[in-house]
Amino acid sequence: MKHRPAGTASDAEQDFRVFVQGIAASLHRTAYLLCGDWYLADDLVQETLAKAYSNWRRVQRANSPSAYVRRILINESRRGWRRNRNTTVQPDIDSTVADMSDEVVNRAELLQALQSLPARQRATVVLRFLEGLSERETAAALGCGEGTVKSQTSRALIKLKSVLNRGDI
Amino acid sequence: MPHDTEARLSATLQGIVGDRPYAPDLEQIESRGRKLRHRRLAWRATAGTGFAAAVAAVAVLTTGTQAPSPNLAAPNSAATSATAENAPLMHLVGYLTTAPQPEGDATLVLRDQVYTDGLKVDVWDLFADNGDLYFAKTRGALPARVQGKHAEGGGDDEAGRKKAVAAAEYAAKGDLNEARKRMALAYVKDPKTAPTLSAPGVKPSGPAIDKKLKITGGDPANSGNLTDNWVWGNSLDALKAGAGSPTVRAGVLRLLGQMPDVRVERGTVDGQAVLTLAAGPAISGGGIDSLIINAETGLPIKYVGESVGVTVNYTVTRVTLADVANGRF
């Protein structure tokens, strides 16, 4: 029997690593907007990718591996949110960007407004307007219909409109 | 909602996340992933078709007796000896395709799993012939599952498992190309978006593959046939779920036997003649994954998964659901 030399990644592992390289940054951004905390986002992405690794063949077989993994991330973020229901995560907008400028303040307001949305609306907004996914792609990632994505988007935008239309962000 | 509002939202979200660098800890991810996989394989009744599907079986007993079930028994030795040397697998398939269906209405499978880190986990799967699956972590817990009709419910795993068993049944006597397609896609939900399938043993090639290998540093010799991987994994699922059915066993062996990267060797385990079907890295994704079956019945005995780090011994028993519900098994 031939054995794989120690330290040599299998094809599946190589595929996984290439996949991670391509999607990690996007997952990290998404995770941050879902939870409002960069450190929690780190953990969310690590756990998401570990789950993807543990199910890698199934991920590869999915119609859209990216959508499959994004769904894992969203489910994980909701689990985390339920765990931390009684704690308030303060959005950690980088204060070094501008010292309490209107822009930073209002970004923080928008982030807080985003955090106040129901989980599915929040995920819909992040996937549609941060990652630029189509309604179809968003539906695939959320495991729902395109009609649901439209209605969730509409409701979320109504709630975010007051912050967005102040004109100073 | 005006378009400019959406554009402003998009721009603001981009501004919030900025260009923060992020590098995932791959070593930690893979370590955690392996633990999750081991835990899932240990405790879940439907192990799925990921990096491994573990199958093995040792004995087949009828309810209330210690004697081998006649309808699961091997063909007589005279019938097996003539062609067994050259084509043991196909000879076995020939026998199984004409063997009668067994008594009982369910197959009870004990999975005795030993992981490379020493963890040992026994679990019980009861596969009803109607497709239902009852799962318990102990033998004693199984009657209550059946009495309460607490079958493992729905989901992609159940649908996929049933399709895999159906594909194996089709493979027993049907067109092998169509059977291979059905088995490979058993867990694919939407056939319209099914990936392109490869013929057995065909290695991927072309500029895209060359580019990928250049990036990943992968060994072209071990370049995998993903369709073979799916057929192997899903076939093992089918063999586990349909271990009690000679038709399923025949179909699975036909499908596995047509793959060049599956090597078949004769041997003995505990005095019984066995066939070892070994899938190389091109199928397993890493290491050699071996399925050991009884050479005369096709019943699975043991699965050794180098790619998963687990060895599984199975004990298969034909039973009736009524007997299990009443604790008589």
Image (cartoon, coloured by chain):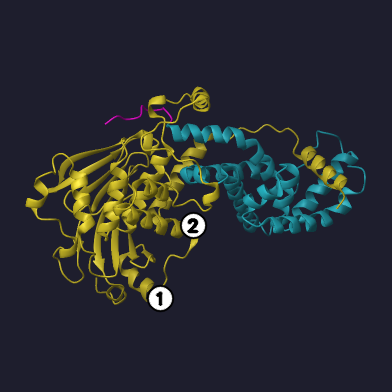
Q: Position of residue B233 (x, y in %)?
A: 38, 46
Q: Residue at x 62, y 53 (%)?
A: A80
Q: Position of residue B163 (x, y in %)?
A: 41, 57
Looking at the image, residue B261 lies above or below residue B53 = above
Which color was chain B given?
Answer: yellow
Q: Is residue B83 left or right of residue A90?
A: left
Residues at marks 1 and 2, CA–CA distance in whole angstroms: 23 Å
Q: Quadrant of residue B221?
A: top left
Residues under numbered marks 1 and 2 in contact, where contact means CB atoms less than 8 Å apart:
no
Residue B44 visible in the snapshot: no
Q: Residue furthest left?
A: B78
Which three-letter amino acid code belongs to the residue tagged 2? Asp
Front residue of A166 and B89: B89
Residue A3 falls inside the magenta stretch: yes
- Report crowding for label 1: few under 14, some 14 to 19, many 20 or more residues within 10 A (C-alpha): few
- Report crowding for label 2: few under 14, some 14 to 19, many 20 or more residues within 10 A (C-alpha): some
Which three-letter amino acid code belongs to the residue tagged 1? Gly
Q: From the image, tell me which residue sits under label 1.
A: B148
Looking at the image, residue B71 lies above or below residue A20 = below
Magenta span: A1-9
Q: Is residue B120 left or right of residue B24?
A: left
Q: From the image, tell me which residue sits under label 2.
A: B156
Q: Position of residue B155 (x, y in %)?
A: 49, 60
Q: Position of residue B3 (x, y in %)?
A: 85, 47
Mark 1 or mark 2, earlier in chain: 1
Chain letter, disc 1 residue: B
Q: Residue at x 83, y 48 (%)?
A: A109
